Amino acid sequence: MPQHRLDKQFKRPPKKYQPKGLNILFEDRDIIFVDKAAGLLTMGNERESDRTAYSNITDYVSKGNHKSPHRVFIVHRLDRETSGVLVFAKTEPVKTYLQSEWSNFNKTYYAVVHGHMPKQEGIISSYLVEQGVFKMYSATNPDQKKQGKLSKTSYKVIKQNDTHSLVELNILTGRKHQIRVHLADKGCPVVGDKKYGNEGKGEKGVNRLALHAAKLSIKHPFTKHDLTITAPTPDYFEAMFR
């Protein structure tokens, strides 16, 4: 990792270049944390490449000039339907560092789920296998487990009413759709989850996936100081308990 640069005080681009669908939570010359809105892709796919968190933040750091040498690098992803903390690197060495240390960082999520968890807190563990391109499932027999990746999610129930629970989650391994699959396995799918919860059958008031990346704690790539960035839990989550 290169030595920390003694640059002049960092200045953000003008307000008119603020990225759509993203609220900047922290930024310096090396990293940028944003609060991603639900419904926005992290990066492009074969169907959509322009309106993404990556393209919007790239426009922001280049101050609207597509020929600018300034750019960002994708460190990790959030599902399109998930809101919350997303971090980008501003150089390739920083991206490499963050990805190599990713398993050591603390990632906290909040989810509103249907029903009540079997215990007030615990760890959900399974071998996740990809089915096709867009869906995961927990392996149930030895042959399937050989194809899967061990996945662990710790959880703690924060509050509950007759029909829903608000759950705090920490992903101990980073697998595709890990939280959504694990909660569905426990009979408590995330509210609004059409893929794993069989959602969309007339439940009133459900307008998004109730999963939010609330907090990300890392060591800064240069200072090595602990850095914890939080994104406020959407009001929509609390509204389900009123």
Image (cartoon, grey):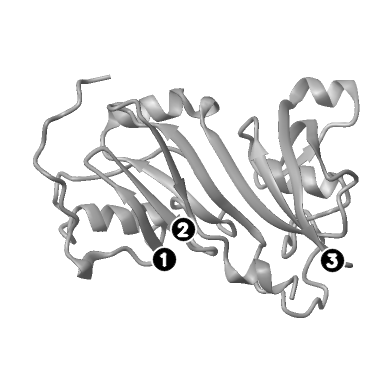
Depth order, front residue of 50/93: 93
Quarter of image, res 233? bottom right
Circle 3/circle 2 CB separation < 8 Å: no
Crowd rating for badge 1 (residues with CA inside 10 Å; few <14, some 14–19, many 20+): some
Q: Look at mark 2 in the image and give the residue it sits on.
A: 36
Q: Quadrant of residue 39?
A: bottom right
Residue 78: in sight, yes or no? no
Q: CA distance from mark 2 to mark 1?
A: 6 Å
- The alpha-carbon separation of the residues under discs 3 and 2 comes to 28 Å
Camera-nearest label, 1 or 3: 3
Which quadrant of the rendered structure holds the C terminus?
A: bottom right
| Marks 2 & 1, CB-CB < 8 Å contact | yes
For this orientation, the residue located farthest to the left is 8
Towards the viewer: 215 or 124: 215
Quadrant in which the N terminus is drawn: top left
How many C-alpha atoms fall within 10 Å of the one at disc 2: few (<14), some, or many (≥20)?
Answer: many
Q: CA distance from mark 1 to mark 3?
A: 31 Å
User: Could you tell me residue 75's position as x and y percent?
Assistant: 42, 37
> Residue under circle 1?
21
Q: Position of residue 104 (x, y in %)?
A: 53, 25
Q: Is residue 95 left or right of residue 165?
A: left
